[in-house]
């Protein structure tokens, strides 16, 4: 195959493919241009998930009339002028590729007025070529309108998600900009409705109120470094009592540029070591300030990744700042061991004997029929409870340890899926409606998933801009923190396909409704849980894929104790285990 120079049209589309990944990419590039232009007010309008319409309007300095056409030329920029400038980039954009790349895959129009000019300039482009240009009255600043995104790249459209999902990405992006620039007033309008509005008063905590809600914002801990410290670490973090089920709430900015960094994520998680439960993550909005010469921002087409000259130095600074804030607000717990409750054995390796009285086990009052194929587990005889977490049972060939939380998750998951299929979810009405405040991104998810939530037992009515009234919940959640559970359900559904939403809700309900590790169970409750687990279709794993049961056969026990005669050992074990008195002598 002979080597040929690509035509300009193909080159432009290749460049656009690197920069314009989805509608949110367009919003990112345009908002960065507005911020670099010194805007203090930025409005983002979106229609059709960003495919039909994207409009970004700002009150920045605008573009001189004689430079408007030049702005759509590749590698044309006023942010750097030489190689030396590239080594110390202080602006968000600098490559001069955004506008021409967008114009290559969409219909673009711009109206801009530069500083004190009397009249503005309007220009329109299709397929990267200018189709009209003229004078037009307008306020100072720039408004860029994008229509029919990817109109000439239909293959790219196939990889986009639903409009609600794309709206969610845009909402998340705008809220991230508001966290990085609290002095700028952002306004996000989706399908004609105001979805998010930041105060623009310079207070990051006030922005947190709009992004995460009043209760969360008030609980956040402030990090404030001295101006003489380099790198300076500033922002807010959540206390150890406030966490989320994914890392979507970790927001990192370097010189107010939003970045993705495994190193920064690891630094924060190391600071929280020992303070959060496994699988939980904090809420973080941190800006790291350091000289532009200490970072390289020109390592990724979307400028979302950067390289630090002294990565270890930054890691230590972030970890130390976060840890100091956590320890200063809530000192580490004492290592003093609390006495065991009167009902417990004096042994730390404690098994509950039959007849032990404990708190009642929710959701185990009624038995349900198993599948026609019959149970996939052998019939088990409950012996007791170990460390208030595991049920000890005897089977035909050895001992079985059942994790009570995972087992109950499996039972509740299959029960919920059956109820969803028959549209007969057990619900619990609330005596008084509960006001639920959601983030902009959660609202977009809620708009598209409200039917799924309703079919799962959540009855919500919109009450205000981003507030909903909750009138009923699934019966399985009657003793849970409903606000937290609903937020986690919405977050977990954000990354799923529409066909997976019902199952995702069922998984979350099972997880939050299952009996917790550490809860003491009566003998009857343990028997009922094991019986229900035996009747499930997939009793050996929980909905997350973790094992619910571990089997230790008689041969393994024999080898462990250095004994011979597995059969006689099993027989003697069976005789001894039939008496509950064997558990009182630990």
Image (cartoon, rainbow, N blue to C red):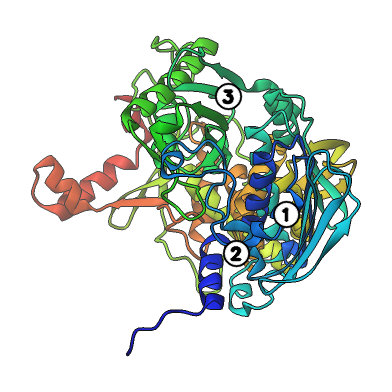
In the rendered image, which residue does mark 3 sit on?
235
Image location of residue 495, percent across then percent down: 59, 57
Q: Nearer the viewer, residue 96 or 540?
A: 96
User: Image quadrant for the N terminus?
Assistant: bottom left
Q: Is residue 567 left or right of residue 430?
A: left
Dot 2 lies on which element?
helix
Relative to residue 204, is residue 480 depicted above or below? Answer: below
Dot 1 lies on which element?
helix
Q: Residues within 10 Å of mark 3 (few under 14, many from 20)?
A: many
Q: Is residue 334 left or right of residue 217?
A: left
Q: Nearer the viewer, mark 3 or mark 2?
A: 2
Q: Nearer the viewer, mark 2 or mark 1?
A: 1
The circle on residue 101 is 2
User: Image quadrant for the C terminus?
Assistant: top left
Q: Earlier in the sequence, mark 3 or mark 2?
A: 2
Dot 3 lies on which element?
strand
Q: Earlier in the sequence, mark 3 or mark 1?
A: 1
- Residue 87 visible in rendering: yes
Q: Earlier in the sequence, mark 2 or mark 1?
A: 1
Residue at 54%, 67% in the rendered image: 17
In the rendered image, which residue does mark 1 sit on?
66
Image location of residue 488, percent across then percent down: 63, 44
Q: Nearer the viewer, residue 523 or 435?
A: 435
Q: Residues within 10 Å of mark 1 (few under 14, many from 20)?
A: few
Residue at 42%, 58% in the rendered image: 540
């Amino acid at each position: 195959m002979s080597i040929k120079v690509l035509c300009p049209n193909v080159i432009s589309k290749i460049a656009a493919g690197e920069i314009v990944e989805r509608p949110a990419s367009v919003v990112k590039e345009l908002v960065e241009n507005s911020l670099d232009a010194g805007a203090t007010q930025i409005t983002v309008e979106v229609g059709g998930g960003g495919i039909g319409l994207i409009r970004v309007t700002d009150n920045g300095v605008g573009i001189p009339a004689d430079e408007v056409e030049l702005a759509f030329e590749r590698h044309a920029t006023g942010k750097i002028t030489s190689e030396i400038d590239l080594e110390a980039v202080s602006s968000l954009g600098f490559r001069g590729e955004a506008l021409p790349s967008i114009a290559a895959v969409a219909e673009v129009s711009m109206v801009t007025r530069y500083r004190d000019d009397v009249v503005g300039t309007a220009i329109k482009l299709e397929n990267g070529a200018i189709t009209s240009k003229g004078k037009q009255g307008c306020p100072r600043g720039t408004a860029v309108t994008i229509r029919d995104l990817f109109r000439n790249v239909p293959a790219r459209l196939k990889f986009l998600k639903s409009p609600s999902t794309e709206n969610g990405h845009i909402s998340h992006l705008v809220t991230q900009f508001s966290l990085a620039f609290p002095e700028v007033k952002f306004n996000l309008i989706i399908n004609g409705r105001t979805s998010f509005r930041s105060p623009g008063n310079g207070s990051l905590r006030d922005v947190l109120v709009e992004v995460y809600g009043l209760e969360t914002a008030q609980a956040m801990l402030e990090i404030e470094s001295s101006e003489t410290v380099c790198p300076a670490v500033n922002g807010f973090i959540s206390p150890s009592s406030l966490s989320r089920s994914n890392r979507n709430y970790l927001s990192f900015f370097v010189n107010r540029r939003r970045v993705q960094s495994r190193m920064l994520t690891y630094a924060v998680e190391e600071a929280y070591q020992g303070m959060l439960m496994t699988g939980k993550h904090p809420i973080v909005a941190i800006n790291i300030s350091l000289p532009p010469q200490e970072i390289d921002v020109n390592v990724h087409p979307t400028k979302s990744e950067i390289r630090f000259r002294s990565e270890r130095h930054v890691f230590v600074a972030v970890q130390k700042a976060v840890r100091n804030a956590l320890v200063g607000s809530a000192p580490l717990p004492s290592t003093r061991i609390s006495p065991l409750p009167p009902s417990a054995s004096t042994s730390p390796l404690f098994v509950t004997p039959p007849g032990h009285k404990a708190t009642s086990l929710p959701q185990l009052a009624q038995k349900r029929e198993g599948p026609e194929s019959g149970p996939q587990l052998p019939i088990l005889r409950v012996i007791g409870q170990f460390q208030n977490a595991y049920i000890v049972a005897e089977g035909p060939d050895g001992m079985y340890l059942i994790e009570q939380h995972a087992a109950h998750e499996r039972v509740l998951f299959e029960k919920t899926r059956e109820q969803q299929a028959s549209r007969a979810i057990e619900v619990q009405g609330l005596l008084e409606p509960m006001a639920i405040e959601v983030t902009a991104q959660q609202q977009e998810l809620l708009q598209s998933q409200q039917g799924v939530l309703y079919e799962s037992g959540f009855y919500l009515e919109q009450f205000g801009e981003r507030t909903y009234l909750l009138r009923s919940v699934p019966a399985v959640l009657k003793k849970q923190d409903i606000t937290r559970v609903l937020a986690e359900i919405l977050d977990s559904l954000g990354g799923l396909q529409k066909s997976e939403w019902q199952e995702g809700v069922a998984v979350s309900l099972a997880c939050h409704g299952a009996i917790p590790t550490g809860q003491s169970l009566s003998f009857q409750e343990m028997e009922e849980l094991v019986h229900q687990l035996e009747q499930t279709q997939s009793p050996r794993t929980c909905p997350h894929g973790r094992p619910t049961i571990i089997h230790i056969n008689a041969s393994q026990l024999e080898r462990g104790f250095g004994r011979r005669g597995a059969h006689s050992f099993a027989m003697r074990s069976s005789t001894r285990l039939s008496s509950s008195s064997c558990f009182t002598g630990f």
